[in-house]
Amino acid sequence: MVDAVRMEQITKRFPGVVANDDVTLSVERGSVHALLGENGAGKTTLMNVLYGLYRPTSGEVYVDSDGLSTSETGAVRDDPRSFDSPRDAIDAGIGMIHQHFMLVDTMSVAENVTLGDEPTKWGGLAVDRAAAREAVRDLSARYGLDVDPTATVADVSVGVRQRVEILKALYRGADVLILDEPTAVLTPQEVEELFAVFAELTAAGKTIVFITHKLGEAMGAADEVTVLRDGAHVGTVDADATTREELAELMVGRGVVLETETPPVERGDPTLSVSGLTVDDARGVRAVDGVDLTVHAGEILGVAGVDGNGQSELVEAITGLRTPEAGRVTLDGRDLSGVSRRERARAGMAYVPADRQERGLVMDFDLTGNGVLGSQHDRPFATGGRVDWRRAREHAADIVDEYDVRPPDPTATAASLSGGNQQKFVVGREVARDPSCLVAVHPTRGVDIGSTEFIHDRLIDLRGAGTAVLLISSKLDEVRELSDRLAVVHQGEVVSVVDPDLITEEQLGLLMAGERPTDVPTADRPSETAVADGGVADE
Amino acid sequence: MSDADDSSGWRGRVTRVLDRLTSASARERLAISLSALVLSVAVGAVLIYGAGLATTCRRAAFLGSCYDPFVVYDQLFFRSFGNLLADPTNPKAATTLGEATILVCTGLSVAVAFKAGVFNIGTQGQLVVGALATAVVTYAVSQTLAGPLATVVSLPVGVLTGAVTGGLYGAIPGALKAYADANEVITTIMLNFVATNLALFAVQAAFKDPESVATQTRRLPAFAQFPRVVFPETADFSIVALALAVTLAVAAAYLLAATAFGYDVRTSGLQSAAAEYGGVDAKRTTVAAMTLSGALGGVGGAIYVLMKLGNFQTNVPAYGFDGITVTILAGNNPLGVLAAGLLFGVLKSGSINVSVATDVPPELVGVIRGLIVLFVAMPEFFRLIARRYTSDDSPGETAVTDGGRPTDDERPGSDDRPTDDGRSTDDTQGGTERPPDGDTGSDDGGVSP
């Protein structure tokens, strides 16, 4: 029962903002510790202090990978550490895996792991590649991280890349591993595998701190959970002795409805339909193969599947960002197949893209500028080719107001907003188009609970107002909860369209893996089979 | 703040400098530019003094050195305008303003392409073809005209010819980039060679003035050139041309900031994926921006012919390349191009003055000029590069200290808490931890009517 890390009364001030306010954190050696909190709660700041990226304004950091020695009163006897840079933290046995990986895509796994610290031969004249490969193979075997050292990083999946990052930290002798939102980019299966890796690591005496805002993960993978809110420490609980409700309340500061109510809505006419859509990806490999889907007015059609099974190509072909090889897209009976992205938006197709920072927002523009993205040529924002910036500003102010975007300032740049607020703004802008259909991809990715709840409510409002919603998400809970029908995709095909209320998680998992179990509760009532809405694709 | 409490080490320091540069406001950038100017003068003065020591001359000009740095800089900067009090339209001022006029055009040309995310190095070539076409077409038109209204017809025809030819010549690399994925840096450099040699060949083969030994076209009648209002007939500068250049700068600023087309251009320049999402046809925007850029370069060529030379001569000065530095100096801001163009005009005509008034060799003057540009442009240049790497995520120190992109949460000062709680108190002390300047500088133009 010794601590590997103790942070005492850490306060970190930025100009005008207190990011961490008197936070104390103890992490037991050989345990998994979750740092839970909403976006902007100060989780990453705290970990950046531990990793030497920031110096705390006040407070002490103690680290000893063999365990800190304490006096009877609990006071630490070791000297406090002061890290000037990550270099110092690494020397002290701390490794951090950032949310965005820092890997060289064109180099092999072994080269990436040993980068900057390569084993050499010939008196330091050459890199000993064989030794590097051997070292990586050793490490991966010891900690159960299944990675091929010779593979090129560009060719491996996101989950494997994350392992490479972990190996990198281990190679540098890390005993305390910090992971910043490690599951944000992973598929459910990869999350499982990651948590298995956690178990292996802690069994070998490593200590893990991971940042998350997902309750389930904090409870499932951690031994202890520390909750931060508004920069302050609000509680540390034993993961086994807590409930989702308790954690949610600690996090948000009030009770949260975890289950979204989806009131029944009379489903209307087919609004968005896709038939025989076949799309190749950038490398010319078939990504979407003859997909048929129909979304009706007042309906949310969910698309579930492991990431990389053609979802992004499907969405891009529907929204007009990618030219399909074959197939048709119609909206309200109008054939949009050969029509530009701009025309599709004008026809009433709103689109919340998967990547808000790449596509959904221009990061250097302010919110006023971002509020007109996609309608910069259309009334009421543009008349005669001239943009009416006053109206645009009002529009942005309305979105900011209605969606509680903070800071509530239309002149703030998109880059200055936190991820959750960026997402709220994008959703707000798209909903404000008053669309006849909305294509929403990962609408709550990287968004805290409070905002997630809010965005879900907006989607349900839209559905209630008779909009057809196509919802693509890698969060299974989300699609199951919100969808009226659920299309499961595997390798570019719609495997089945099922009823999300009746299907079990296990059946869904099998479908997503490409198996076709019998007795799956399909969502299509017999009368509707005439509508080409993606029954099982023909063999 | 002193930043002493944050990560140290050279990497951290570099990062902070870059962050400060990216987040510098317009006023800070002006201050940076001015201090860089002073610094460059100091370094240059040492260089001139040292060079003077190493040279032998009959009588030392300054503390044993053959060259007097004070005289050099006096000539370079202050004599560029001659004696404005005695004669505001003196030839030196005319030369300075004339150079500035052309450099504003080429600077705008590069700026517009840059805004669209296209690095147009081909302004030089666009200027050359524009100049040649202007000379040829204007000559042909002027032969059919006479009388008091001849200028009114001939001049617009000449300028338009330059614009159209330059525009078409700029459209080529634009189309190659958009539809054939050809790197514009390479194509425009190559097209510069093509333009220069094509012009040489065309003049020799078809348009050469038979009465001259030099490779140049026939001289245009005075009425076909920019009228010398205010300035004397002998000056190689016309206030009309300057007015045209200023109008173009204002128009470019308006186009970029206030129109839907400008929004498309800026969006594709900043973030092409977002532009695509926003319904911007990336290919068409690239071609359009390059056409516009080429047209501005072509107008520069037209002014060069119709104001400065009166015909086309094949040894065209590197206005197009200087335009790149002008726009970098101006932070890609069309209105800033006016100021940067003027500074360049001063340096160009000032160099001539130095050569005339002192024994300093022209090569050394070139070095001095280069130093000034280097010092003044470098902060802006680093800013442009730094923005490319940090703009999408830098609320300051989080950004690159470890190469680490910050996560979605914890953007200091912008989080889920009210931010007007005295945010401004510390803010004045240094920009490092602020979000990058989206619209504080003028170069985003964007959102103010």
Image (spheres, rainbow, N blue to C red):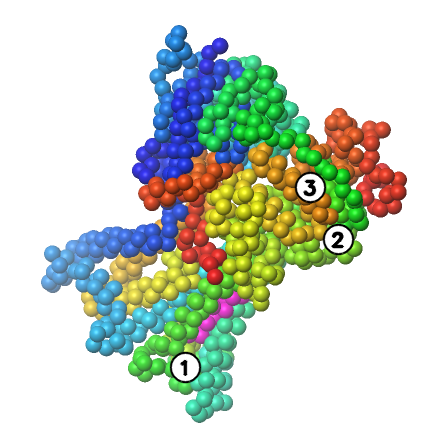
Q: Mark 2 or mark 3: which comes first in sequence? A: 2
- Circles 2 and 1, Cβ within 8 Å, touching? The answer is no
Spatial CA span between label 3 and label 1: 68 Å
Q: Nearer the viewer, residue A324 or B439?
A: B439
Going by the numbered disc 1, the residue's amino acid type is Gln
Residue occupied by mark 3: A460
Write down the residue under mark 1.
B225
Q: Are marks 3 and 1 in contact (CB under 8 Å)?
A: no
Q: Which residue is mark 2?
A: A331
Which residue is depicted at the point 77% across and 57% down? A334
* Magenta stretch contains residue B300: yes
Discs 3 and 1 lie in a common subunit: no
- The amino acid sitting under disc 3 is Ile
Residue A351 seen in the current view: yes
Expressed as whole percent of the image width and height from the top left, the position of residue B24 reads 37, 49
In front here: B157 or A134?
B157
Instruction: Name the chain letter of the residue that bears numbered label 1.
Output: B
Quadrant of residue B231 within the rendered picture: bottom left
Residue under the point 60% across and 49% down? A429
